[in-house]
Amino acid sequence: MIAAAWVVYLKEFKDALRDRRTLLMVLLSSVAIGPLVLVAISQLVAGIEKRSEAREIVAVGIEHAPALRNYFERQTYIVKAAPPHWEQLLRDSKFGQPVLVVPADYQETEARGEAPVVELVSSAANQRAQGGTGGVLRLLRAYNQEQAMLRLALRGVAASALETVRVEERDLADPAARAAQLAFMVPFFVLMAVLYGALNAALDTTAGERERGSLEPLLMNPTARTALVLGKWAAVATVGMLIAVLSCLSFLPAQWLLRSEALAAMFRFGPGEALWFIALLLPLAGALAAVLMAIAIRCKSFKEAQANATVLVLAVSMLPLVTVLNQEGTAPWHLWTPALAQTTLMGRVLKGEWPGVAEVLPSVVVCFLMAVLAIVFVARTLRSAALK
């Protein structure tokens, strides 16, 4: 049976490599996935850094508050006038900076001993403008503190009298953990590359052969159905594992394309991280290959198999979102859920936390059981009279 399975494996693997859809998926999802994802992340970070380094304040009516303008300029900020129709530009996300609006009666209100009201206008739908509000708010608070200290000093009151508690912030996250927050999409895209890479091969070797009419002649051979299924599964799993290896290794040279110096300094994805990614993805690739074959074996056409496999694709793509939406840390059941376990463990690898055997073993066991059950189901389906 092993010899027969090996013959079927070689035949199916060669057919998979001849399939243009599979080859295109291999090239797009494995070789290009690393550069594309890292370039996209680095452009996002580079844009944020560029806006933060610009040190610009966009204001309306700043001439009514010369002291406030002087404070901004002393902090090496450049004050610019807002463009015409700036409110509409903010709504349409065509302007990426918040606008500080100073009322015309700013000095009169301040002279009466009252606090003038200034507006910091942005749009929650405009992420670029919304991201710049934090820096402007910190400047305004610092200006308030400076003015309060000056007024207390004029009255002979020590400014320290208002400070009952001194607060110092301390961040426990190391640079690797901060970089992992920016590269959270890397495990997701690698996972989806493995899924879509094995998808076409699995559907073509089952529903595709049935649609072409080549499955029935294959079943007429005096070969055990288990050998046929093992050979087909091994070919599909090899394609998925090959994509897993290529997609993980593609991140090594892709780091040369990083535009953000801060991200390049923090993000570390070396051979060790690549090997961990591959080791975590190989069992999942085998399980997904078997489950996809089990879904497609009862379908009469390739399109029908694609429609039925949509449920699995949706489940695999949605499960990793649990790590993003969950704010309470990793739960024990996360490590027993396929796709979610791999995403969780790959995230830990990016943070520099190497998973232990007790953390990796549950996902391996579940993937093994899934593969065995799916292979048994496919073999039993091939023995039924429905395919003859």
Image (cartoon, rainbow, N blue to C red):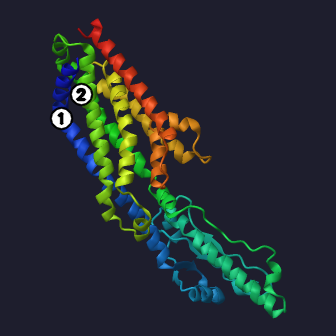
Which percent across, then down, holds residue 107?
71, 87
Which percent across, then down, holds residue 217?
15, 13
Which percent across, then down, holds residue 231?
24, 24
Name of the residue lying farthest toward the top:
385
Badge 2: residue crowd in 10 Å (few <14, some 14–19, many ≥20): many
Is the residue under label 1 in contact with that under label 2 (CB below 8 Å)? Answer: yes
Q: Residue 100 or 349: which is nearer the viewer?
A: 349
Q: Residue 328 or 296: which is nearer the viewer?
A: 328
In the figure, residue 364 lies in which quadrant?
Answer: top left
Q: Amino acid at mark 2?
A: Asp
> Which residue in the protein does label 2 denote?
204
Name of the residue lying farthest toward the front:
357
In the figure, residue 197 lies in which quadrant?
Answer: top left
> Which residue in the protein does label 1 denote?
19
- Which is more N-terminal, label 1 or label 2? 1
Q: Residue 298 or 248: which is nearer the viewer?
A: 248
Which percent across, then down, holds residue 145?
72, 81
Is residue 126 in view from this perspective?
A: no
Q: Residue at position x 53%, y 45% from top?
A: 323
Q: Amino acid at mark 1?
A: Asp
Badge 1: residue crowd in 10 Å (few <14, some 14–19, many ≥20): some
How many tags in the picture? 2
Is residue 208 in view from this perspective?
A: yes
| Direction from residue 327 to residue 111 in the image, left or right | right
Q: Residue at position x 60%, y 62% from top?
A: 172
Quarter of the image with the N terminus in it: top left
Inter-mark Cα distance, 2 to 1: 9 Å
